[in-house]
Amino acid sequence: MEQKVKKSTEVIERETVALGSAAAFPRSYPLVAEEGKGSYITDVDGNRYLDLGGGAAVTAVGHCHPEVVASIKRQADKLIHNCFSETSNEVTVNLAETLIKLTPGDFAKKIVFGLSGSDANECVAKLAPYYTKKSRFISFIGAYHGQSLGAAALSGYIPQSLFPSYIPVTKVPYAYCYRCPFKLTYPQCDLHCVKFIEDYILQTISPPEDTCALIIEPIMSDFGNIVPPDDYIPELKRMCAKYGILFVVDEVKTGFGRTGKMFAIEHSGVVPDMMTMAKPMASGMPLSACVAKAEILDSAVAGHLFTTGGNPICCAAALATIDVIKKEKLVENAANVGDYFVQQLQELKARSKIVGDVRGKGMILGIEFVKDKQTKEPASTETAKLCYRAWEKGIVIGYMGLHSNIIEITPPLNLTKEDVDLAVKALSESIEDVEQGRVADVRP
């Protein structure tokens, strides 16, 4: 694919002058999106790309799905804004009732709406201590829960560690079996990472009488789409129940069908006390939610409200998104096409010198690149080159992880097997080009 990038380059030059680096992330290629349809985006120069990132896992039903667009337009004609702390509106109530039925747990639940995954997890940071009258949290090294101060404090990701925390959080290792922090092997380890929390953390620096909640991503996303062993989540839940600690699940990236279940936590059969969601729920419109036991979200009147939280246009988009997911059987498609994708990537791994690990569930996959499969030395530069070469071949992907050596695949859930074949061909050719030294260090 031979790209024209003149206008894209001009826009990015303007962006560099106008937008602060605090709201930016290093990119591997100069792409300025202008239009999105289904699983494809077109840039301002007219180049068309298969989108394997889905706008950071947001476009679950594809870019600009016509039913979502129509729902947004209908609602915009009727009511654009409603400050929910002053007046109510039915579309927001409809969505709250829908989410209560959709989420795990047959106990009394309620909803609090916000604008992003950050403020959904900020709700946890504020209300879990207030409700339990206990101050401490347990979260995980590598976790990404958001950018606001409370959500950043709960996170264990490098950029969030730059800022001081106002809440006490103990961060523990996640079940990252490919790079076990304890240098053990599953299942012989007997889930040592859980026993470490129970036998050491709860007995020392975060005792149960001071610990309000444990918050976890059922698949650790930005640290590399890490899928824990099947018995890991149930064991954590058992531990939390035993010691009276709230079990909180962050589904901001994994919710709404991405893993082959409506919510990733459903793979484990575990029911959380609180659950947060955002990204795909309104197909890119700014909307988030925290769903929890009713008594938790009723514990602090006006404790977490936003002027534009639960905006009626965003809620209409969310209701349409949920309808499309059900009508088009996108949960099932994510499971089936995701399995096919993993199979193809496993075959690619067997052929490649630098593909160290392939993992994922449904349409959230990670490919970890290493310089040597025995030592597992991260191949960070090679990963950046690979993203660039794939872009040249018409594929949009990005890298992530502690060492920036993991490619994330979170495409729209309506991806087809034909799209997968196209993607794997481009990835295979790009990997070969990197392995053979055909991708320059300096970008043109």
Image (cartoon, helix red, strand yellow):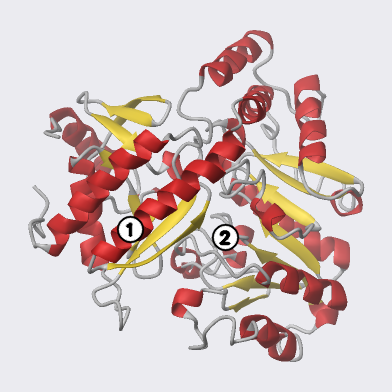
Q: Residue at x 64, y 17 (%)?
A: 80
- Density class for disc 2 (Cα within 10 Å; few <14, some 14-19, many ≥20) is many
Query: Residues at badges 2 and 1 in contact (C-beta under 8 Å)?
Result: no
Q: Is residue 101 left or right of residue 170?
A: right
Disc 1 on helix, strand or loop?
helix
Q: Is residue 147 left or right of residue 25?
A: right
Amino acid type, callout 2 = Ile
Whole-angstrom CA distance, mark 2 to mark 1, is 23 Å
Q: Residue 373: horizontal and vertical position, in percent?
A: 29, 77
Position of the N terminus by quadrant: top left
Dot 2 or dot 1: first in sequence order is 2
Residue 353 lies, in percent from the top left, at 22, 69
Task: Between label 2 and label 1, give the one nearer the viewer.
Answer: 1
Residue at image point 68% right, 9% down = 78
* Residue 337: image tag: none
Identify the secondary structure beneath mark 2.
loop
Q: Residue sitting at 52 percent across and 88 percent down?
A: 184
Q: Is residue 404 above or below residue 291?
A: below
Q: Nearer the viewer, residue 418 or 377?
A: 418
Q: Amino acid at mark 1?
A: Glu
Q: Which residue is mark 2?
A: 219
Q: Which residue is mark 1?
A: 347
Q: Is residue 122 visible?
A: no
Left of 309 or right of it: where is 60? left
Give the residue at x 60% y 46%. Answer: 260
Report x, y in % for residue 31: 25, 37
Task: Work out whether residue 224 can be spotted.
Answer: yes
Q: Nearer the viewer, residue 242 or 227?
A: 227
Name the side, left or right, on which 207 lies relative to 63. Answer: right
Instruction: Answer with the quarter of the image where residue 148 lies.
Output: bottom right
Where is residue 318 shown, x and y percent of the image? 65, 29
